[in-house]
Amino acid sequence: MIAAELAKQWRRPRTLGTLGALAGFSFALTIALALSGADQLQRVGDIPLLIVPERAGSSIPVIALASTMKFFLPLAVAIFAGESIAGDAAVGSLRYALARPLSRSRYLLAKLLVALLLSLVAVLLVPLAGLAAGTLAFGSHPLSAIDGSASTALHSAILTFSATDTIARMGVGTAYVAAGMLSIFSFAFLLSTLTAYPFAAVAGGVGLTLVSRVLNSDYLPGVAVLNKWMPNNDVDLWEHFFQRPAQTGGMAHFLLLQLIYAGVCLGAAWWWFARRDILV
Amino acid sequence: MIGAELAKQARRLRGWVTLAAMAAIPAVLTLVVGTTRPALAERVGDWGSVVTDSSGLTLPLISLSAMLLFMLPLAVAVFAGECVAGETAWGSLRYLLARPVARGRVLAAKAAVAAGYSLAAVLIVVLVATLTGALAFGVHPLTVLDLQHTTPFIVASTKLSPLSAIARLGLASAFVSAGLSSTFAFGLLLSTLTARPFSAVAGAVGLGLVSRALDNVPGLHALSPWLPVTDEASNLWTGFFLNPMQTAGVGHALLVQALYTSAFALAAVWWFTRADVLG
């Protein structure tokens, strides 16, 4: 069941196109940086982390993950989750799939696992392609970064991480970002069981990141109290791994929040899908 | 033609709901800020800052700054994305086009009415914010802090008389409206391409998202001045509230908007005059 679903999704141009675009993003980023300003300090993320890309190839995965985590990765995850059920409904094959002697829950579970796997591949692909492209372009050297939050005008806090240390920190950071996509994934998956238009489910998943960003005290005054309950705001906390000592404040709360969003949305998706009247 | 379209849209609930939301958000914002943190400085744009209870005229600045990211583009996308695709979804587009009016004129009338609604959305935000702000905090001279030029030793600020502040507010509204025109034109183009209004609206909002995401990628800074929607360009209006008025980059931003708007609008006209209308 899962193997059949995986084989089906893998053959779709949409899957390969999305994954290809993400890998291409890391390569394009490397080329753009190599052509312009690889020898200058680049600011990474909202938590000020300053890196000179040219000095170490392992800087590229950091930059690539930081610049995709707020929009391009949620988009890819929303595509995989939003397409899963609604994609079948849109081409009219859902009722034939459900006519097979399998319970709806098993069908839903297979869809869920395959979409989860593809989403995980998407998140892993960005830093991996970045590491490959970065090492090719700039070589494997220790990464030095300036911690902007610990620096003053007179003293800049320069930290150096060995190549293996950087990769280990990036590994944990990537796992954190992957876990942080869970809320978007689950919401898009829920929408996918509700609508027959895949585009609506994908747009809804991306819409959740938008709501998260709009209800942020940086943009809208007076909503600071909501900040820590928003699904996508704290996904950038992994950048604190590149401080010394590594800061982990707020991470446990964010991961718990992801589990809550996932539990509610996936539970609702299962409840609804098991009872739904399938017409197409 | 325009009159008929206007009468039709005025009977539809969607436009009124959207405009009502645009009026409600600044009012709620005044209420929330006024009850929870009236004496605090709120950031406006990239570098500006105003102390809310110093004058009611701070509220339009806070509202514009808060709604520029998402609410206003959404409203504009709703009006532009609905205008043709809404008819297609209802199945009334082919009857509309069967009337002895050129397709170009139909599109122009629809676009003009949608543009009018979009402009109204921006104006309503500014007007409601000014009115509720004036009621809550009174009409006093407006003081704007310039965080860019403020050092520990000097506070750089500009004090504007109410009249001058309102005149500058008009200018700012015009610039903000112009900044939304690429989103509007893209929504209009999508509206002629799809039969589902939701897709056109989401696509038009998506233009701003993709553009902003690209703007924030290090290494692609060379692209930034030519993207349709960037934080830097959309926040240029805050420069109008300084003395002397800062207008650097405004001309370039308007030029970029004009380029995108005309490209999308031409594509919409080209496609709509040739499209095979089935719905």
Image: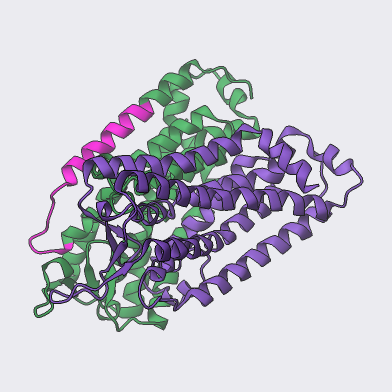
Chain colours: A green, B purple
- Does residue A202 lie above or below A25 as drawn? above
Q: Position of residue B69 (x, y in %)?
A: 42, 54
Q: Position of residue B112 (x, y in %)?
A: 70, 53
Residue at 51% from the left image edge and 68% from the top image edge: B227
- Does residue A44 lie above or below A73 as drawn? below
- Does residue B179 lie above or below B34 as drawn? below
Residue at 71% from the left image edge and 45% from the top image edge: B84
Left or right of residue B184, residue B224 in this image: left
Q: Can residue B269 be spotted in the picture?
A: yes
Question: Which segment is the magenta one?
Answer: A242-266
Q: Main secondary structure of the magenta part?
A: helix
Farthest-out residue, right = B100
**Foreground: A50 or B112?**
B112
Q: How many marks?
A: 0
Q: Quadrant of residue A64?
A: bottom left
**Foreground: B212 or A14?**
B212
Residue at 35% from the left image edge and 69% from the top image edge: A132
Q: Quadrant of the C terminus of chain A?
A: top right
Q: Position of residue B218 (x, y in %)?
A: 36, 71
Left or right of residue A73, residue A276 in this image: right
**Foreground: B277 or B11?**
B11
Find out whether residue A81 is within the magenta segment. no
**Foreground: A178 or B139?**
B139
Q: Can residue A12 be spotted in the picture?
A: no
Q: Quadrant of residue B152?
A: bottom left
- Does residue B114 lie above or below B147 as drawn? above
Q: Quadrant of residue A163?
A: bottom left
